[in-house]
Image: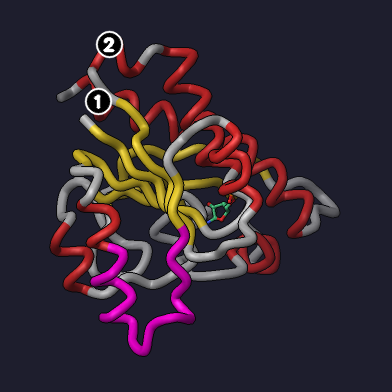
């Protein structure tokens, strides 16, 4: 069971997944291995870390393609080379075409930094603070063609405190993401 992870930036969620897989023995327990980390940005810090860990990596820059469809088709080709059972989006900041989503239906998962269905899209922490929410958090969900929708597989709740800033809240949510995402993936693997 191969797992492919797509990132765009720091890759801290990808790192949490790789480390949990090792620590918890995903390969021994469920035959699950993280076979590749793919980034749409050559300068993503997460990619360098993945390389150092000896993981297979690939870069596919969306700027080299004329359309979203062309980028997604090329991305699918790289992904399919690894024959993944699961494709995990971990801070992958590109909107995927319906065709791409359909190709991986049921095995395409994302983590989003809000308590969905509230605050889809960007800038979630600032919006949650400005709305006066008492809690924020993160959601792991199945990906559908509608951005940040799809079945919710797990959530982590993080209180918003007086005087919170988007940056401080984001840091607290991110550390919960690092627990949430691996635990949801482990549960999916255990379910076969
Ligand atoms: C995370 O907050 C993720 O939920 C969001 O982007 C951030 C990515 O962080 N979509 P990282 O690249 O995993 O460090």
> Which SS does the magenta portion mostly show?
helix
* Label whose residue precedes the other's in the sequence (1 or 2): 2
Q: What residue sits 48% from the left and 65% below the top?
A: 40
| Residue bearing the label numbered 1 | 189
Residue drawn at (40%, 45%) of the image? 5
**Between 59 and 169, the one nearer to me in the picture:** 59
Q: Look at mark 2 in the image and give the residue it sits on.
A: 29
Q: Residue at x 44, y 76 (%)?
A: 62
Q: Nearer the viewer, residue 181 or 103?
A: 103
State which quarter of the image contains the C terminus: top left
Q: Are marks 1 and 2 in contact (CB under 8 Å)?
A: yes
Category of crowding for the residue at label 2, using alpha-carbon neighbours closer than 10 angstroms: few (below 14), some (14–19), many (at least 20): few
Which stretch is magenta?
A: 59-75
Residue 3 picture quarter: top left
Identify the residue at image location x=63%, y=68%. Answer: 127
Magenta residue check for 81: no
Q: Residue 35: x, y in percent?
A: 34, 36
């Amino acid at each position: 069971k191969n797992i492919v992870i797509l990132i765009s930036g720091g890759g801290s969620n990808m790192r949490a997944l790789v480390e949990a897989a090792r620590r918890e023995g995903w390969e021994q327990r469920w035959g699950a291995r993280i076979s590749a980390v793919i980034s749409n940005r050559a300068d993503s810090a997460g990619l360098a870390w993945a390389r150092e860990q000896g993981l297979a990596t690939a870069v596919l820059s969306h700027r080299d393609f004329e359309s979203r469809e062309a980028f997604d088709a090329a991305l699918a080709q790289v992904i399919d080379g690894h024959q993944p059972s699961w494709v995990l989006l971990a801070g992958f900041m590109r909107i995927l075409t319906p065709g791409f989503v359909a190709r991986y239906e049921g095995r395409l998962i994302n983590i989003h930094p809000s308590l969905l269905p509230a605050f889809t899209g960007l800038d979630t922490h600032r919006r949650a603070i400005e709305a006066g929410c008492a809690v924020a958090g993160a959601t792991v969900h199945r990906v559908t063609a509608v951005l940040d929708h799809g079945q919710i597989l797990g959530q982590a709740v993080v209180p918003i405190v007086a005087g919170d800033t988007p940056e401080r809240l984001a840091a607290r949510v991110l550390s919960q993401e690092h627990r949430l995402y691996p635990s949801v993936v482990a549960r999916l693997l255990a379910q076969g």
